[in-house]
Amino acid sequence: MTDDRARWELSLHESAHLTVAESENVNVQGACLLRGGGGIAWHSECSGFSAALIAAAGLAADALSPGIPTPETPPAEPSPPAEPSPPATAPETEPSSGPPDWMSETPRPPTPSDAGAVGLWTIGGCLLEPERWPERHAWLLGLSERILLDHKAQWLSLAMQLHRAGYLLPESARVVHDEHGK
């Protein structure tokens, strides 16, 4: 797998969390791809079913991503000639074009993996009925997949933005609902 393909699949995975979170009326915050090869999507706290469904979205995206081609990378434009550097004492007046500071790679408390969160929900409520676990697991993944396919244009739009920029800010991450709230 090429680095670009891996980045695309990770973008699909993280944007799937945001797409399903938005469909569940969970406030999305953004997403970013980490230099170490991982990614993270932020949304407001939620519990129970919504949390499991949002986690399952990443797994559903992983299952769907092999059928989604990597977007064409636009040809690189020639770089303009380098401008002379300002004197060392000149204050920095241009805003940074990178992600905001809150998206830095600072240590965070551990959270369950997507599969772990789905597993906890799958078992929860029917701990003494393990014969129901596979059915609950398949149902949750199927529902996440259907939500992604119902919102495919928005999901892919988020994934393309994330793939291109490496991060999504809250204003660009909220694209699932149209003017009618669907």
Image: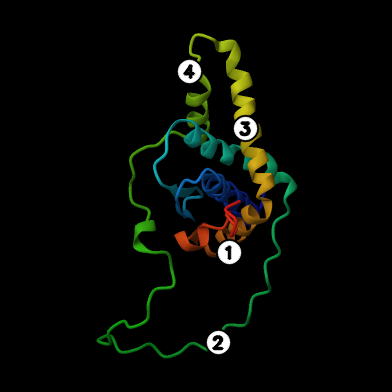
Q: Which residue is mark 1?
A: 164
Residue position for label 3: 141
Pair 4/1: label in front: 4
Rendered residue at 63%/59% (across/down): 157
- Number of numbered discs present? 4
Foreground: disc 2 or disc 4:
4
How packed mark 2 is, by other alpha carbons closer than 10 Å (few <14, some 14-19, many 20 or more), is few
Image coordinates of residue 173 in percent, x first then y, are: 51, 57
**Which of the numbered marks, if any, corresponds to residue 80?**
2
Mark 4 residue type:
Gly
- Between disc 2 and disc 4, whose residue precedes? 2
Q: What amino acid is labelled 1 in the image?
A: Arg
Mark 4 or 3 closer to N-term?
A: 4
Give the mark nearer the N terminus: 3 vs 1.
Answer: 3
Q: Position of residue 148 (x, y in %)?
A: 64, 45
Mark linked to residue 125: 4
User: Alpha carbon of mark 2 to alpha carbon of mark 4: how far?
Assistant: 61 Å
Q: Is residue 166 visible?
A: no
Tag 2 near tag 3, CB within 8 Å: no
Q: Nearer the viewer, mark 2 or mark 3?
A: 3
